[in-house]
Every structure is written in C-alpha cells, then in structure tokens.
Image (spheres, grey):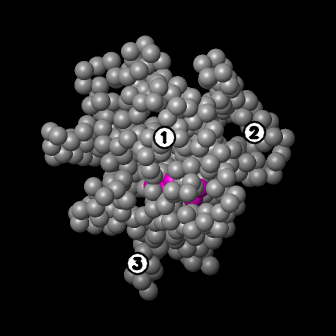
Amino acid sequence: MSDAATHERPCQTPAITTTANRMTWKMIAVLFLVALTSRATFGIYHNATRGETAPVLEFPDERQYWLIAESIASGNGMRDELGFRASRMPLYPAMLSVFARFEHGVHLAKIFHWFLGASAAALAAILAARLFDRRVGCMAGILVAFDPFLVFSSSLLLTETPFILAMLLLFLALAELVTGNSPTIRAGKIVTVGLLSALCVHVRESSVGLVLLVLLFVAIRRLFDRSAIRFIGGTLFLVALTLVPWMMRNNAILGRTVFLTTRGGISLYDGVGPQADGTSDLGDLKASPEVADLTELQWNDYFMTGATHEMRQNPGRLLTLAIIKIGRMWNPIPNVESYQSTAVRCIAGAWSLPTFALAIAGGIILLTRRDESAPWIAGLLVLPAVYFTALHSIFVGSVRYRLPAVVTLEILGAAAILAVWMRCKTAKATHCES
C-alpha cells in the first residue's frame, strides 16, 4: 500500500508547501532576461521591417495616450485630441509624459514597456510558485516570456502591459489569503492590497469591477469572517481615498464630480449602439455632427443616453452582439486586418489553441484534487477571464482585452504541463518496475 501511494503522489499537481514554493533570485533573473530579450528582439525587428512611411504609433489609442502625455509634458495638463480633460485615467499618461520630454520619447517609452513586460513574466513565475511550486513557477514564467501576443503588446503604448504588472502584484499579495496560509488578515496586508487595487484602477478604470470581484472572492473563501469584512472595507476605503484628488480635480475643471473618466458613454455606445457590429468605430463616432458642439460632459451624456436607450429597446440584439464580441476577444488569431498574414495566423493559432486547452486541463486537474485550497486557486486564476469576458460582451471585444486573463490562464496551463509530465514519469517508473 505504501508503494502504491509513493507512485501516485507525483501524478498530482504539486501541493502548496513552505519549502518549494519560492523562486530563487537566480531563477527570477534568468526569466526576466529571457522575457526582456524576446520583447526587445521582436520590438527591434518589428520597427526595422515596418518601413519609413509607417507610423511610429500604430493604433488610435496609442496616439491618444501619447497626445495626452505630450500635453502634460508641455504644461497644458491632460488634453486629448478633442481637448477633453478627463477622457483617460491620469496615471498612465503621466508616466508617458516623462518620455514625451525627450526627442525620441516614443522609442524610449517602448523600451520601458519591454522592461515592464519582462517584469510581468518574472512576477507570473513568482505567483505560480507561491500557488504551486517553483517548477510550475519556472514553466509559467517561460510561457509568459514567449507568449507572442504579450511580446507584441509590450511594444505598444497601451495600458495592457503596465496593467498586467499591477494585477499580478495584486494577486501575489492575495495569494496566501486564497491558499489559506494566512489565518488572520493584518493591517499591513489591507494597506498593501488597497494600494495595489488602487494602482490597477488608476491604470485602467475598467479594472474596478475586477477589484470588487477579487475582494468578494477572498471574503467567500474566508466565509465572510470578521477579518474578511474588515479587509474588504479597508481596501475599498483606500481605493476611494486615492481617487479623491482625481475627483476633486475633475469637479474643479468640469464642474461635476467624475469618479473615473468621461469615456464611459462613447465606449458603451461603441459596443451596443445602433451602429455596433462587435468591432470598434470610435473614429466615426467622435466625428459625428451631433456631438460636434457639445462639451465634454454633454458629449459623455449624449452617448451614455443613446447606449442605454438602445439596450432597453433591443435587448435581444445584445445577446447576438455579445456572442460576436466574445468570439473576437478569444479569437486564436488577431482580428486586425494588417496582421492576417499566413505566418502570423499560424504562429498565433499554434500558440493560442494549446494555451486554452492547457488552461482548461489545469482547471480540471485542480478541481479534482483533494487539496482543499486547490479549487480556490483555480477560481482566482480564472477570475480575470470570467470578468473581462463578461465586461467585453457588453463593450467592444478585442484580442488585446484578454491579455491580462491570458497571463493567469498560462499559470493554470503550467500546472497542467507539470501534472502531465509527472504522470508520464510515474507511468514510466511503474512500467520499468513491472
């Protein structure tokens, strides 16, 4: 009986331990350098092969962020192409404004994003090691380091890369609460989680729902004990507190308290308006003659009213649009027409489909384990996919919006890879003994 038990243990996904769930600095440094090399290599190659006439910033959101950054750097405060002052959360444009002061600021900002992306790969490894063990951590770090979508995104001046880093920091702070390794929640933990939650929201306002969902998840995990209630209250208080200066600034400039941004109306209209087909058409919406003479608040109200009216009038259409947008979001290959070459489609599909399959396998393995914390670990890692899929079934769907979720799914995939490898190793050992 003891021999059978010895052969069965390696078949399971590694259990959480206190000795094997720490990455060494050498492992972290190697993963960081590998991820940095992949991002820098692609970025340099991509920039060199695009041609002199190609725009330095490919996508409209990139150009808008950089325009706001230049406005901040010139001393005019936050202003986008329409002159609006609160169309984006301030943290990311403020960060870009540091680079906007230099002659080759765009290129310097992209290099900085390579470092952020490489740091995310290292953090993914650390998180995976905390939740499983260092073998899963190394595998997860490798997957994130070479993910072609993440590598490509690291050369774009968009919030995906810094947000992934912020989200992983938050999940790392929550890891011991989910695994059950922390019987009490101390004040320091509340402050840490509160500030990291605020960081996520200040980088990307759509993450406010994810923060709420994660906090609720932790509270359910702890059966809403007294410390969990204090934890939720303290965290939300800190997030709200960090938003107060931004709200006061908006009230002084716009004459109304804006909690997040004035972009909610057009974003929702882009997703559900009468013209919506699952893709984004913000350029034409901004050029609409109906909003040409409206102030920033009136502009936002106009689109918000139109979007909510359409949702009430045609609720059945929302389901059709949701299916289209979810399909676009989880499309194994890019939706952008300029990235539809045979090589790109093959590389993207060859990476995406196994990644999705491994994530599903990892989730199933965890759910079937006898370890009490395993289903909760699976739940934490799946939460970003659930949240962003639900969110972008309403708003526009795009491959870039799934990237934060893909990172945590790749941790599940790493756990599945190791579990399969251990099963094969055990089966081979059993066969040799027989």
Between the residue at mark 2 and the residue at mark 1, the CA separation in whole angstroms equals 45 Å
Residue drawn at x 43%, y 26% as measured from the top left: 68
Asked if residue 396 is among those painted magenta in the image, a careful observer would answer yes
Q: Which of 32 and 165 is in front in this view?
A: 165
Residue 34 left/right relative to 283 = left
Q: Are marks 2 and 1 in contact (CB under 8 Å)?
A: no
Q: What element carries label 1?
A: helix
Q: Nearer the viewer, residue 65 or 290?
A: 290
Amino acid identity at mark 2: Ile
Q: Which residue lies furthest to the right in this view?
A: 226
Does residue 140 sit above or below 103 in this rendering?
below
- Residue 149's x, y, as percent? 36, 53
Between circles 1 and 3, the one closer to the viewer is: 1
Q: Mark 3 or mark 2, which has the lower sequence index? A: 2
Q: Residues within 10 Å of mark 3 (few under 14, many from 20)?
A: few
Residue 91 left/right relative to 241 = left
Amino acid identity at mark 3: Lys
Q: Nearer the viewer, residue 236 or 129?
A: 236
Residue holding disc 1: 289
Q: Mark 2 or mark 1, which has the lower sequence index? A: 2
The part of the image, by quadrant, that contains residue 338 is: bottom left
Residue drawn at x 64%, y 17% as measured from the top left: 252
Between circles 3 and 2, the one closer to the viewer is: 2
Amino acid identity at mark 1: Pro
What numbered label is drawn on residue 428? 3
- Residue 300's x, y, as percent? 59, 37
Image quadrant occupied by the C terminus: bottom left
Residue holding disc 2: 232
Residue 431 left/right relative to 40 = right
